[in-house]
Image (cartoon, grey):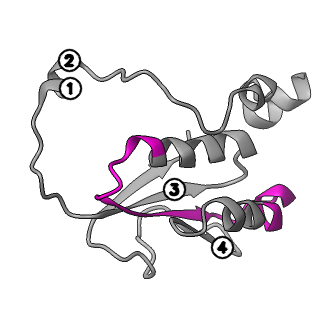
Amino acid sequence: MKRLYQINQYNIMASDRIPLNRTLKDMRNSLCKAKTYPKSLPKASVIIVFHNEAWSVLLRTVWSVLNTSPRKILNEIILIDDASEREFLKEPLDDYLAKNLKDIVKIFHLPKRSVRARPPKSAKRNYYLFSKER
């Protein structure tokens, strides 16, 4: 367990026990809950950049975005693998996404560390929401 903690800097065994697709209590401030938003909002692409992330953390993030974002404004989720070295973030991740989330999630594997602040040309909308690891 110490070795796993050193790799990820958190308890990966505890993380792996939490379901990937789960429902969370709405923790927003009551003022945010009461706010009225325009009926017509532009669609957005959510871009998640990761490097050597734990499987459970990455997929829970994806499912969380799907479960908490209104589908009418969520155009797509784009995962950008910034040259991860962990094998499970390559073909096994591609296979999981193709089987479970192929219509909404795209993944790009970069050969060398190079991304952070520029949206990929493949993003379909003018609005991009970036999420970065720790």
User: Quadrant of residue 54 in the image?
Assistant: top right
User: Quadrant of residue 68 in the image?
Assistant: top left
Instruction: Specify the amino acid type for callout 2.
Output: Ser
Q: What's the distance in space between the residues labelled 2 and 3, CA to CA?
A: 28 Å
Q: Which residues are magenta?
A: 67-92
Q: Nearer the viewer, residue 58 or 74?
A: 74
Extreme-bottom residue of the structure: 121
**Which residue sits at x=55%, y=39%?**
134
Tell whether label 1 touches label 3 (CB within 8 Å).
no
SS type, badge 1: helix
Indicate which label's residue lies in the foreground, 4 or 2.
2
Q: Which residue is mark 2?
A: 30
Q: Which residue is mark 4?
A: 110
Instruction: Specify the amino acid type for callout 4.
Output: Leu
Image location of residue 22, percent across then percent down:
57, 32
**Which residue sits at x=73%, y=67%?**
94
Q: Nearer the viewer, residue 86 or 97?
A: 97
